[in-house]
Amino acid sequence: MRTGIANLPLHYGKAPSWLFQRMKALARQITIAVVDEFGAEEMLRKLADPFWFQALGNLLGFDWHSSGLTTTACGALKEGIRGLEKDLGLFAAGGKGGTSRKTPKEIEGFGRFLSRDPQELIYASRMAAKVDSTAIQDGYQIYHHCFFFTREGSWCVVQQGMNEFSRYARRYHWLGEGLNDFVCEPHSAICCDQRGECLDMVARESGKAREVTAELANEKPERLIKELERLKSLELPSRHHILVRDMNPERLKGIFLRTYEAQPKGFESLLVIKGVGPKSIRALSLISELIYGTSPSFQDPARFSFAHGGKDGHPYPVDRSNYNRSIAVLEKAISQARIGRREKLETLKRLSLLYSKAPRE
């Protein structure tokens, strides 16, 4: 299920090479430690937790409040486990910009190591991206998509969208474990600071709207275009101005012809039709409300560590020697644990427990 959303301001620049090399090394050792101790599925659960992921990015030394934390942490993880995927039983695909579009091909590339049909994972990847870019219309354009998965076919997604007007980015987390429905409340926690106007077609309250919207997609395009033309002359609630102003009925006619030919059986099958994007879904949801009174949810679904410093010097500059020491300690603890000497790894676990029980100011 989608487990969370985090809002982060847009920052420019990238991690310098000296820092990113350390990020990869530390991410590699952390991943090995988690997988060795708890299994690859637990690593997915941790990545799907927006708070754990944020802490990981901070631990790696990236800016605590930067949108770049997402892309850099995912990049460090992907590069960090490169060459170890088969041994770990953990794989990573996708990334930022054009790299995100290579996700299906990268998943297929690992197919020989999997005990599950790669096409099922490719479908999960595409649906996660389609839901957050089309079914949820919150003003954020997806530009980063990272897909993590195991040999057995468990998976999680960490993806991020950008809002050019607010200068903020929003991060979306998905976890395949326990997911029964891609289009009805697929999240268990959503975290962010900023909210705005939003069309949320995957909210529980949008259930009837999803049903009617899929039924309308089976109608002849001429009827849908006629209803859209009516919308232009109606006095609608203020929330609808963001839904109507940029829709051109004639341009949507070709998409409606495609949905009519496909005859989708439900909202999920409508969503996966090629070409069905935000404007198509907005138009169909408006028509469903106009004709049948089935209003979708317009509530923004968003709800709501320093260890080595940050790239920009906040809260303090990265301590390179301390960073190197952390990597070395983990490397030694893991290598000794693998030959049966687990004392150092057990000590790290005890320190973690003590920290978790310590009083907070």
Image: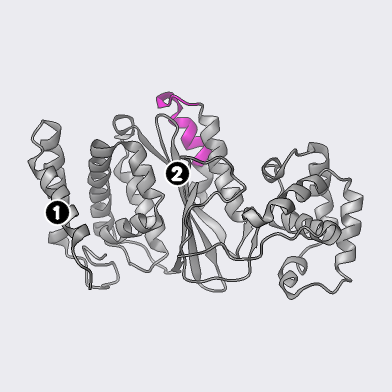
N-term-proximal mark, 2 vs 1: 2
Q: Secondary structure at mark 2?
A: strand
Q: Nearer the viewer, residue 346 or 339?
A: 346
Q: Nearer the viewer, residue 225 or 79?
A: 225
Neighbour tally class for label 1: few under 14, some 14-19, many 20 plus, Cα within 10 Å: few
Q: Indicate the quadrant containing the C terminus: top left, top right, bottom left or bottom right.
A: bottom left
> What residue is rendered at 55% in x and 47% in y?
128
The question of residue 114 being in magenta is answered with: yes
The residue shown at (23%, 48%) is 25
Q: Quadrant of residue 198?
A: bottom right
Magenta-colored span: 103-116
**What residue do we see at 68% from left, 46% from top?**
271
> What residue is disc 2 on?
156
Quadrant in the picture for residue 73? bottom left
- Give the number of marks: 2
Image-based side of 40 in relation to 355, left or right:
right
Question: Of the residues tagged 2 and 1, which is closer to the observer?
Answer: 1
